[in-house]
Image (cartoon, rainbow, N blue to C red):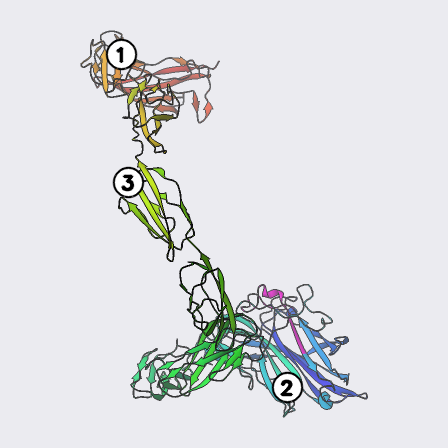
Amino acid sequence: MKKYWLVLMVLFLGAKELYANHTKGGWMYYEYLGPGSAANTSKYRITLKVYTECNLNAGQIDASVPFTIFDATSFAQIDNITVPVSTDVNINNCALPDCHPCINNIPNICYRIHTYETIQDLPNTPGGYIISYQRCCRITNIINVLPPSQDQGETWTVNIPGTAVFPGAVTNSSAKFSQNDTAIICQNNFFTFDFSATDINNDSLVYRFTTAYSGGSNTSPIPNPSSGPPFSTIPYASGYSGTLPLGTGVTINTQTGIVSGTAPGIGVYVVTVAVSEYKRGTNIKIAEVRKSLHIQVADCNTTTAKLQPSYTSCDGYTVNFTNLGGSNNIQTYDWSFGDGGTSTLPDPIHTYADTGIYTLKLVVNRGLACSDSATSKVKVYPGFHPDFDVFGQCKNTPIQFTDKTVADFGTVNFWSWNFGDFSSPNNTSSLKNPTHTYTTSGSYDIQFIVASDKGCIDTIPRTISITDKPAIDAGRDTLICVIDTLQLHAVGTGSFLWSPNYNISNLTIPDPLVSPDVTTDYIVRLTDAFGCVGNDTIRVNVVNNVTQSAQPDTTICKTDPITLRINSNALKYQWTEIPAGNTLNNNTIKNPTAIPLATTTYRVVGSIGKCLAQNDITVKVVPYPAANAGPDPTICQGNSVQLLATGGSIYSWSPAAFLSSRVIPDPVCINPTASIRYVVTVTDTLGCPKPVRDTVVVTVDRITADAGPRDTSVVLGQPLLLHATGSTNYLWSPAQWLNNIGIASPVALPQNNIEYIVRVSNNFGCFAFDSIRVHVYFIEPSFYVPNAFTPNGDGKNDLFRPIAIGMKSIDAFRVYNRWGQLLYSSTDMNGGGWDGTFGGRGQDPATYVWYAEGTDYKNNKIKKRGTVILIRE
């Protein structure tokens, strides 16, 4: 019985938990060991290598793993094997920090490798076997995996071929990847990563990027047994795929397995490579091995001189150069352009004096540590002008594509056409001037790639339209008079044939003369150079005369436009004005617009060839009404005013509020309560049917007189400054003891109680009255303070405050309790007072001490103190 040795290597980086193992890649292979212990069986070795971070918790390492074996044809489960761990070693990328002196910010890459191994006998079958192992889950924030990446697991699988591939396939050993997993990859730097494999059978190996598998779940991280094929794949993030795992800047060499290119940004990326094994010298595919890794792109830079494989300048003699390798560690640049020119700039621009092929060389850090160099060829052949023509336009006929490229140097020797007809087996061509036949009309995107033997190459995209028939236009249907001759004109490319042959000068030209005496349909047939045929028809209507009538005469308001309208079958029109003027927007159209300023007759002549018809339209012009709502009046509140509008025969006022009538020119606005705007609409009976509006504003002036406080008190001999407000004119009475009765703020020196009345008015005659009573005390100026108060909220004696008579100001008024605590303080002359509270709480009934200080009207200081009793009822 034959046995096979099957090896499964799995990479786990950054595992954090037992059941979130953070799977990060791996690969599976098998090795044939010889015939099995039973008849018609083979022995294979199965090995599993698990890669993890070097420092792990004990719970993060699986002591054993399940391998599930399926029939490769029916996918039925054959066996499920538990395999224990056998070895455990660490590998590092280098001993930091001096292992890579030409890389800055070197990442530390360390793998702990756990090996699982078993040997199995498998019966020889036509279909062979599929072996798989599944584990969940991957790490978070994988760049090229659709989030959440931590929900995705992985499946490692390999196929052992059966006898159906070829009779000896069961003795094959699969390819085995090399263990080169510690390469340093720096973001935006050129790199190589070795995915190469070896094969002990010396078979041919072909490499490719492929889609990574998923497997397991958060709830079942290690399916036991594994779920069967076909296996599900991981979802890739936008811009990435299984065949573009690191973006468009990274490729794999199909013959060597070397991955190279410019690295993408910082982060972890899933990269899966499949190596296909072919029997040497044949196209028989024996087996395929997949290796999947989570590759870390680090924030580092390498010192590299890297150029393009070649440079070709086809549009001039000037070429731009730049180093494509890492630049952070580069101190010097030495460029040699191959024509004797040099430069030490990082990104030089060089102009060559002549055409030719030059050797470009770049040396970075010449004579220093981390020096590197690169060379490339520069081809300078300007004057490359790619172009092409397309002839033909119809489906099911050959379309001719013709190269028009001009090369000043060398010879155009490469053509690649893509006709955009993807359903056609002949969609492409490498001929210089090919033809292609489209079977369906529509738009097609053409791509033409053309190159010369000097290395110049360019791509020209163009969209063409394929139609059912050639473009042919016989013109619009027309009209002629029976006595006339008409020239037809067809537009198209190809040969023409007209029918019927009825009063037509020539049947094979695009623009023959016709003179039918009855209405006739002329059909033109166009045949292009490729045999595509199309038809179009023009109807020539024949009449004996022009049929024409005009609108009746009309009246318009001056400055208004009017559209002149006629009913006519004429082909051409000519308008004239009587008297002559320039009031038409166009005098050759059927229905022009006129703006006459005086009464005008418009004459129109309609023609069909030599047949004519004439009509007149007279437009009478009358002026608009001269609406005038009159001047804006101002009245005093309570008064009325008569309005007067002029300019027409009919009047309508709006709004109707306060008006004696809405439909007369001179209504009375009766006692309006506020200012109001009236609009009058004026219409006349002179012929202008449109109303004209004007506006008048009635302003209502209202006087509010205020003589100041209703009552005030003074002591004998104290002057009192009165102050009235409300308008601009003031008159006080009586005049007794006043220094001036005609101002807003006179000074009074009353000798007894008196009431002063002020009349407040404006310049329009509006007025109002107010008064103030003055009490005169025959006492000395002082404070008069009550000895008790009752703050119970009944509105009587609720506040404790001083009464100032003859005082100019109260400079202090304070209330204290018996412990000397200040409870209230104020300087208010005209209000306020203590309400018997302190800190928001009512104070207890008791005796309180007060102190008052002020200045009398003679500027004498007066100070008093005393007590007050707070009474609660």
For badge 3, the amino acid type reads Leu
Question: How far apart in space, not on screen, are marks 2 and 1 (Cα)?
Answer: 122 Å
Looking at the picture, tell me which residue is in the foreground, 388 or 748. Answer: 388
Give, as a three-letter code, the residue at label 2.
Glu
* Earlier residue among tags 2 and 3: 2
Query: At numbered mark 1, what does the secondary structure look like: helix, strand or loop?
Result: strand
- On screen, residue 673 above or below 511: above
Q: Position of residue 643 (x, y in %)?
A: 31, 22
Please say if the residues under marks 2 and 3 sit with CB atoms less than 8 Å apart.
no
Residue on which disc 1 sits: 757
Image check: 286 left or right of 765? Answer: right
Task: Report the quarter where the N terminus lies.
Answer: bottom right
Q: Residue at x 21, y 19 (%)?
A: 859
Q: Helix, strand, or loop for circle 2? A: strand
Q: Is residue 855 above or below residue 169?
A: above
Please tell me whether mark 1 or mark 3 is closer to you in this view: 3
- Residue 148, which numbered label? none
Residue under label 3:
597
What residue would you read off at disc 2?
277
Residue 108 at what x, y percent from top left?
Answer: 51, 75
| Relative image position of residue 188 (x, y in whole percent) | 45, 74
Q: Amino acid at mark 1?
A: Ile
Which stretch did the figure color magenta?
A: 136-157
